[in-house]
Image: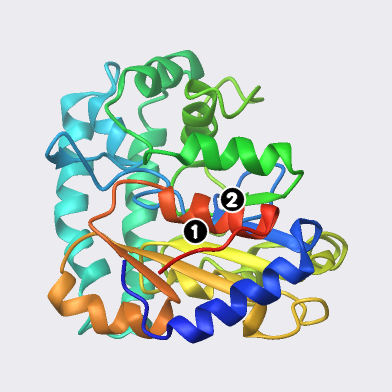
Amino acid sequence: MRIKNPDAVKRKLTRMTALGKDNLQVRAFVYVHVASQVISDFDWTMSKFLYKGEPNPTCHGIFEQAPDMTLEIQNQLHILQKTYEPIEWDPTIPVSTKIPIMVEWWDSAQKAIVTSNMHKDTLRATVNQCHLALRDYVGDFMVQLHRENIPLLIFSAGIGNVIELLLERFLLRFDNIQGLLIGFQEPIIHTYNKTIASFYTSDYINNVLSKRSSIILLGDSSADPSMVDGIPREGVDSDLSILKIGYLNNNVETLLDTYMDIYDIVLIDDATFRIPLEVLNCIVHSESLDF
């Protein structure tokens, strides 16, 4: 764990503890209709980056393991990932340059997936058999949020149907609606446009998000701290009440300084949700947190 300014983090925690759990939002980031508020990304934030020494699949990646997916589509998805993922994570490429490239990637991948005409039962079987693993203590974290009636918002460039089924698989989510995977939500969500302002109606923002005045944000990319952009500033009175926790999964030497600047707490090669859970307990139970 790295913290650039421990005193600032302590001040934020003191402020958030004083505000109490009823003012807390946790944001995770999945664009699906989930009862929500912690802001958190899903792929490689709530899910592990590595599992048993191998890369943990993303929500898009599990389609390469789908039994009804043709080898042609599997290869197409694999080639798209190998082509575009290095661009996504390259810190030398401006975000303005990356955005149309990310849209091109997700659009191509989603069209390939839809052409498979995969039935929801097949998707469920694929999700249940895939090797995607959540970080240790994610379940405890989500149960604690539910117990304390703290809203969780998962906001992700991953696929909502898959995330819902994964949460169901891990007994952290319930029913789903659609029987066929026939399309994807517009506009396409990618790493660099995941903001409240881009995807939520003013009624949702004003009636739900603006009611709580402290936020825990969880992410793993340099763009994830922007997920809070667009939340009305009433209630969230300053950055003092937004605590940003970032997972730095790879390229540590290259990215550490950047992550230290944009996240309050940076977790390096950490396969767990232990720190987010401790932060949550600190706020809910007024416990101290040692750095």
Q: Residues within 10 Å of mark 1 (few under 14, many from 20)?
A: many
Q: Amino acid at mark 2?
A: Tyr
3D distance between C-alphas at marks 1 and 2: 8 Å
Pick whichever, 180 or 223, lies toward us: 223
Identify the image quadrant of the N terminus. Answer: bottom left
Q: Residue at x 71, y 74 (%)?
A: 231
Is label 1 in contact with label 2 (beta carbons under 8 Å)?
Answer: yes
Which residue is tagged 2?
A: 31
Residue toward you, 195 or 13: 13
Foreground label between 1 and 2: 2
Residue 78 in picture, x, y percent from top left = 17, 43
Give left or right: position of 42 versus 36.
left
- Give the quadrant of residue 191: bottom left
Q: Which residue is rendered at x = 33% and y = 33% of the image?
A: 133
Image x and y of residue 45, in percent: 39, 52
Answer with left or right where residue 9 lies relative to residue 106: right
- What residue does disc 1 label? 189
Q: Quadrant of the C terminus?
A: bottom left
Dot 1 amino acid type: Ile
The kind of secondary structure element at disc 2 is loop
Q: Return the x and y of residue 167 as percentages of the image width and height.
A: 52, 30
